[in-house]
């Protein structure tokens, strides 16, 4: 959630940020939080005064007993016994106010980076660059489903029968290709000095709530019935939760992780889940990059994370573009964000295959993940994440861009040592 001090000290900055995100309906919330915060601090002062009074009376009781003034001691003891009840009542009021404040803070947008382009919605997102050569074909282009079914390495009909739409069977060379892409990225990121993580596939609700706008995202999450657990939609959540409640000495920062996991999403929305194939699925393999760092360092690690993902797609020779999110399309928990979109010759369009985010202190604040400087001062860390690769979507682009006239698929050279073959074809 957003830092309450921003509203205490810079409420106009918070309001201007809300306006840039075209969420004017949230403007009254800033003043509401400010008033609630004043009320909360008054109640906290009352608690502090009552505790001070309790300590003072305790001293007076001891003095009365020393002076053998039994009458006064009895009166003071009676008065002292009334204070804990008063403290409980006032603390209850303070806690109720604090809960209201946190509920509102959770829906007030994070302060965006100044470089974020202002725009109302996704139609105003900004193309930052295009990289790679768009292939030209002298034969009718097929989509990845047609290609894979013809080669006999995927079964989407059987998976629909066993599990429903949005699932798939990878067979023979396609399964090997999936693993080859994962191994390539794992080795690539290890050479970059990132720490490899295989996280839990379920996390508690508090982690989901800290990671992003939970109410907006919950329709995409799979809930474990009878448990306070959700299947992870990305390794980001589990890696974030790994340091909950921890304080990291500054000399150990930054902490750079990359996590491989299966990911699970309902994908309920305007696109539906009826598209056959690997592009939009309920279950997929993904390697996620994640960094915990000092606040002043998050901009440079944002650039580093983008560079990592770009180098991966360049090595795979997949054409892509970088699409920066404008203010109106930027998630409320993000300071800055961009998407990496791969080219698909079947649609003649670019489609999202990865998302990069600087989440500032939004995620770490909720889970109390802090840094400790050499002066002994604690501060909330910044968190960043980026998709290194979601293999299902990456394979779609790889397959469609590398299809051959005879129906086979060329494998990029960088993967040969992992696949053991250079071409995927019908046997």
Image: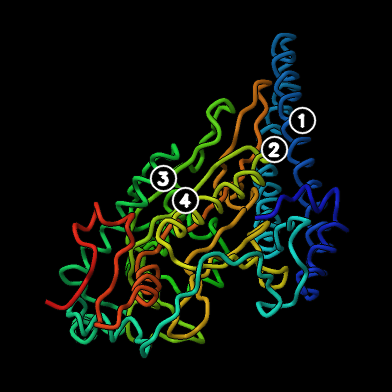
For the residues labelled 3 and 4, say whether their Cβ atoms are less than 8 Å apart: yes
**Cα–Cα gap, marks 4 and 2:** 52 Å
For the residues labelled 1 and 2, say whether their Cβ atoms are less than 8 Å apart: yes
Residue drawn at x 69%, y 13% as measured from the top left:
65
Left or right: where 250 falls relative to 426: right
Quadrant occupied by the C terminus: bottom left
**Cα–Cα gap, marks 3 and 4:** 9 Å
Kindly identify which residue carries mark 2.
83
Q: Taking 104 as reference, is 125 above or below it?
A: below
User: Where does residue 103 sit, x and y in percent of width and height?
Assistant: 65, 62
Q: Nearer the viewer, residue 84 or 293?
A: 293
Left or right: where 136 falls relative to 116: left
Answer few, some or many: residues within 10 Å of disc 3's Cα (few below 14, many 20 plus, some between 14 and 19). Answer: many
Mark 1, mark 3: which one is toward the viewer? Answer: 3
**Cα–Cα gap, marks 4 and 1:** 52 Å
Quadrant occupied by the N terminus: bottom right
User: Where does residue 161 sit, x and y in percent of width and height?
Assistant: 19, 86
Give the mark nearest the N terminus, 1 or 2: 1
Residue drawn at x 27%, y 82% as measured from the top left:
147
Q: Taking 57 as reference, is 405 above or below it?
A: below
For the residues labelled 4 and 2, say whether their Cβ atoms are less than 8 Å apart: no
Kindly identify which residue carries mark 4.
289
Mark 4, mark 1: which one is toward the viewer? Answer: 4
Residue drawn at x 53%, y 28% as measured from the top left:
252
Kindly identify which residue carries mark 3.
189
Q: Taking 61 as reference, is 32 above or below it?
A: below
């Amino acid at each position: 959630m957003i830092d309450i001090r921003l509203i205490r000290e810079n409420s106009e900055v918070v309001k201007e940020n809300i306006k840039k995100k075209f969420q004017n309906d949230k403007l009254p919330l800033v003043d509401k939080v400010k008033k609630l915060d004043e009320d909360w601090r008054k109640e906290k002062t009352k608690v502090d005064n009552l505790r001070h009074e309790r300590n003072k009376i305790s001293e007076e009781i001891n003095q009365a007993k020393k002076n053998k003034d039994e009458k006064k001691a009895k009166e003071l003891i009676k008065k002292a016994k009334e204070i804990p009840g008063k403290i409980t009542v006032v603390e209850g009021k303070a806690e109720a106010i604090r809960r209201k404040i946190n509920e509102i803070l959770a829906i007030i947008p994070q302060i965006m980076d100044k470089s974020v382009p202002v725009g109302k919605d996704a139609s105003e997102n900004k193309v930052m660059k295009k990289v790679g050569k768009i292939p030209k074909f002298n034969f009718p282009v097929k989509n990845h489903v047609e290609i894979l079914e013809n080669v006999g390495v995927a079964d989407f009909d059987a998976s629909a029968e066993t599990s429903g739409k949005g699932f798939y069977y990878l067979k023979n060379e396609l399964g090997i290709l999936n693993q080859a892409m994962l191994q390539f990225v794992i080795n690539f990121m290890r050479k970059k000095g990132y720490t490899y993580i295989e996280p839990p596939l379920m996390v508690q609700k508090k982690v989901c709530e800290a990671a992003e706008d939970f109410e907006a995202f919950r329709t995409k999450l799979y809930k474990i019935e009878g448990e306070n657990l959700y299947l992870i939609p990305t390794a980001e959540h589990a890696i974030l939760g790994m340091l909950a409640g921890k304080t990291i000495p500054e000399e150990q920062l930054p902490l750079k992780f990359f996590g491989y996991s299966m990911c699970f999403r309902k994908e309920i929305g305007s696109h539906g889940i009826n598209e056959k194939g690997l592009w939009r699925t309920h279950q997929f393999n993904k390697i996620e990059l994640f960094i915990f760092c000092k606040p002043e360092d998050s901009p440079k690690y944002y650039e580093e994370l983008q560079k990592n993902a770009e180098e991966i797609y360049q090595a795979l020779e997949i054409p892509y573009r970088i699409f920066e999110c404008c203010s109106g399309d930027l998630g409320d928990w993000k300071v800055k964000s961009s998407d990496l979109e791969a080219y698909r010759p079947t649609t003649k369009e670019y489609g999202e295959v990865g998302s990069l985010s600087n989440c500032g202190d939004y995620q770490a604040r909720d889970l109390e993940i802090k840094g400790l400087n050499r002066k002994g001062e604690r501060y909330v860390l910044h968190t960043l994440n980026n998709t290194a690769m979601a293999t299902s979507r990456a394979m779609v682009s790889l397959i469609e861009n590398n299809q051959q006239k005879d129906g086979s698929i060329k494998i990029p050279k960088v993967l040969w040592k992992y696949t053991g073959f250079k071409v995927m074809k019908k046997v």
